């Protein structure tokens, strides 16, 4: 009884210390959060723009015009200009060039803009430059432009505001902190119109979802200080036809690059040669200038009319010193698709062969199949935690079953003998296999609905955030009985039963108290970080790994020490090991470890998968959007899905 009383006093002291530490943490004001978010967004997109070499040596001369009225994709100019009823509508001059993008946006009274263009037309580059220029030219207190990809939004399942709050909390973890009036800091910033959403990739939503998305954006627009949306032209116009225009938004259309634009850019990307400092591009560009009389030149000019293809041509020829005259060879590329496919293939080849030798070169020969596998199985967003759902369910079920059989079998056997050990092994195998297959794959810091919901456990964690949850306790909802809860109940029941059988009712009460303490500290570890920064994939993985290991130490230490004190050291050690193992295995990081081992054994992906993805990002093959990667462009992903694509031709090909 003395040990039980000592444990109770120690547990209460620890609870009060933890809770008091949380309560004393000074909360940031919304102004401070907004300023930190502005700095984080600026840093995030400066790095991304540098990796995409947008300013190296100068930007591609992207230009746009107002969408022609006959296409029917824009609202009335009176709504765009916020004109009073009966007032004369005044058309806003929205045509411009890339350096003018922020000025053009500020010229639109409604602060709502739609950017249309073809695939590879420069929409993403324009949005990045808009975000950076608005931040650079902005004043304190002005809404922070936040660039997000629309690919994860299901407008039939969640409204725009709810999705936006979840994405902000996932991409900038400090914004998931509690707020007394709005639930989270992200929701508070949005409610007070301190966020300017900049939405890329509306066209990448399923066709049936695009009209619904436009209607949802219109419903949310009155509560926003502005809105920017980018889409491919045809997909947007189809969505407008099935839904509605974006209310009050000016619509611009990106213009194709002309030969003069190519001549102003491509020679500056190549090494000069000779006393006249000419490059290998000059003869090619001279032939393109005579395109009306040259079918081959017209084809090349048409392919290079998008910034994507121009940047790929720069990588394929300027960066390698190869002769771009090969583009004009009629025997190699009979159609525009052939030529575009060649440039897309060369993008992968150049990225993995330039400055590479030895082991790096041998690795380069394997990346084509790896990238093709990702294109086929990962979806538009390459999220490491979602890759865990790709292997057959039998794989995680088997791993979880073996672990559960060993863990619970040893614990039960140590406490109550061989028969109990056999029963524990069977129960452990069934429950652990079930949890491994059904537990939502949500890393620490991401919203609970990202990957299937996290139920009761994340709800409990919200109570410990600064500011708590409005209205006190979380509201019960469907899905509160999760696989994780089943695992907790099963393991906890085993520990309580072991205490009862070994030392009676007082020991069972002490074991239950240890479980509650572990659960409290477990939820406390899920509280989001207080650092406002863009959470990249490596940061998300690192946070989930640290949390898993911390939980392993906390859970294993508390439950193992308690069991050792109540029963014996051997049983305590078994409980500590089983609890620590479950704390790692039943997490997004643990499941990812199982999945990547499966991929590596089958030769589908490298063992150091995150390092490979990060390297592909640095080489310009992938881009980073928040905590996920995407292929540099949808056309590259589509190309990798083409049989025979993704191979690495010779550097000078």
Image (cartoon, rainbow, N blue to C red):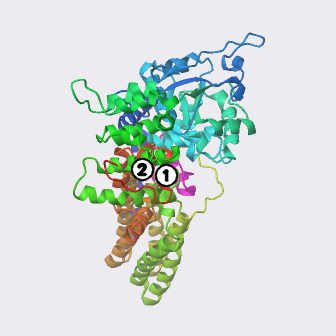
Residue 453 lies in the magenta-colored region: yes
Q: Residue furthest bottom?
A: 419
Dot 2 surroundings within 10 Å: few (below 14), some, or many (20 or more)? many
Residue ID for mark 2: 345
- In the image, which residues are magenta? 443-469
Q: Left or right: 607 with respect to 298?
A: left
Q: Left or right: 80 with respect to 5?
A: right
Please say if 347 is above or below 43. below
Q: Position of residue 260 (x, y in %)?
A: 44, 24
Q: Residue furthest front?
A: 293
Secondary structure under badge 2? Answer: helix
Q: Left or right: 33 with respect to 611?
A: right
The reply to whether residue 19 is visible in this rendering is: no
Q: Position of residue 603 (x, y in %)?
A: 38, 68
Residue ID for mark 1: 639
Residue at left offset 60%, top offset 49%: 474
How many numbered discs sit on the rendered protein?
2
The residue lying toward the viewer, choosing from 69 and 172, is: 69
Q: CA distance from mark 1 to mark 2?
A: 8 Å
Dot 1 surroundings within 10 Å: few (below 14), some, or many (20 or more)? some
The residue lying toward the viewer, choosing from 140 and 70, is: 70
């Amino acid at each position: 009884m003395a040990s039980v009383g000592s444990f109770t006093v120690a547990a209460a002291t620890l609870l009060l210390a933890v809770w008091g530490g949380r309560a004393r943490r000074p909360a940031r004001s919304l102004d401070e959060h907004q300023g930190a978010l502005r700095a984080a967004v600026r840093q995030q997109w400066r790095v991304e723009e540098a990796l995409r070499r947008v300013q190296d040596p100068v930007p591609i001369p992207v230009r746009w015009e107002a969408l022609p009225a006959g296409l029917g994709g824009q609202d009335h100019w009176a709504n765009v200009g916020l004109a009073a009823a009966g007032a004369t509508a005044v058309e806003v001059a929205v045509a411009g060039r890339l350096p003018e993008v922020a000025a053009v946006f500020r010229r639109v009274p409604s602060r709502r803009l739609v950017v249309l263009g073809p695939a590879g037309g420069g929409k993403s580059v324009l949005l990045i430059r808009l975000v950076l220029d608005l931040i650079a030219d902005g004043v304190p207190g002005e809404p922070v432009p936040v660039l997000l990809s629309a690919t994860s939004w299901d407008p039939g399942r969640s409204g725009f505001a709810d999705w936006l709050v979840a994405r902000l909390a996932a991409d900038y973890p400090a914004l998931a902190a509690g707020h007394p009036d709005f639930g989270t800091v992200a929701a508070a910033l949005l409610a007070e119109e301190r966020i300017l959403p900049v939405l890329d990739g509306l066209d990448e939503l399923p066709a049936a979802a695009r009209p619904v998305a436009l209607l949802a954006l219109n419903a949310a627009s009155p509560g926003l200080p502005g809105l920017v949306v980018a889409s491919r032209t045809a997909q947007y116009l189809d969505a407008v036809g099935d839904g509605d225009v974006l209310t009050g938004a000016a619509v611009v259309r990106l213009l194709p690059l002309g030969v003069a634009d190519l001549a102003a850019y491509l020679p500056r990307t190549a090494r000069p040669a000779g006393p006249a400092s000419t490059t290998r591009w000059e003869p090619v560009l001279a032939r393109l200038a005579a395109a009306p009389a040259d079918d081959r030149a017209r084809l090349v000019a048409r392919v290079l009319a998008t910034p994507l293809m121009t940047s790929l041509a720069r990588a394929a020829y300027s960066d390698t010193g190869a002769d771009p005259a090969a583009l004009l060879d009629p025997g190699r590329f009979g159609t525009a698709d052939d030529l575009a496919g060649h440039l897309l293939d060369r993008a992968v080849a150049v990225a993995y062969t330039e400055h590479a030798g030895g082991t790096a070169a041998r690795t380069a020969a394997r990346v084509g199949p790896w990238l093709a596998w990702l294109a086929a199985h990962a979806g538009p967003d390459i999220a490491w935690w979602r890759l865990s759902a790709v292997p057959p369910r039998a794989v995680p079920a088997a791993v979880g079953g073996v672990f559960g059989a060993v863990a619970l079998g040893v614990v039960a056997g140590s406490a109550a003998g061989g028969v109990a050990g056999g029963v524990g092994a069977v129960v452990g195998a069934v429950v652990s296999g079930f949890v491994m297959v059904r537990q939502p794959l949500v890393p620490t810091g991401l919203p609970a609905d990202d990957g299937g919901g996290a139920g009761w456990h994340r709800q409990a964690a919200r109570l410990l955030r600064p500011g708590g949850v409005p209205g006190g306790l979380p509201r019960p909802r469907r899905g509160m009985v999760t696989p994780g809860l089943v695992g907790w109940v099963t393991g906890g029941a085993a520990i309580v039963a072991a205490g009862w059988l070994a030392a009676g009712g007082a020991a069972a009460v002490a074991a239950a108290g240890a479980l509650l303490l572990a659960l409290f500290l477990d939820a406390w570890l899920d509280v989001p970080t207080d650092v406002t920064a863009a959470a990249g994939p490596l940061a998300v993985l690192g946070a989930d790994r640290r949390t898993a290991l911390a939980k392993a130490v906390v859970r294993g230490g508390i439950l193992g020490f308690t069991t050792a004190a109540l029963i014996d050291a051997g049983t305590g050690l078994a409980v500590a090991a089983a609890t620590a193992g479950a704390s790692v295995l039943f997490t997004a990081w643990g499941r990812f470890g199982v999945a990547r081992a499966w991929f590596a054994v089958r030769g589908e992906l490298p063992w150091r998968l995150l390092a490979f993805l990060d390297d592909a990002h640095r080489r310009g093959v992938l881009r980073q959007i928040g905590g996920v990667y995407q292929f540099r462009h949808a056309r590259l992903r589509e190309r990798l899905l083409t049989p025979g694509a993704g191979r690495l031709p010779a550097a000078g090909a």
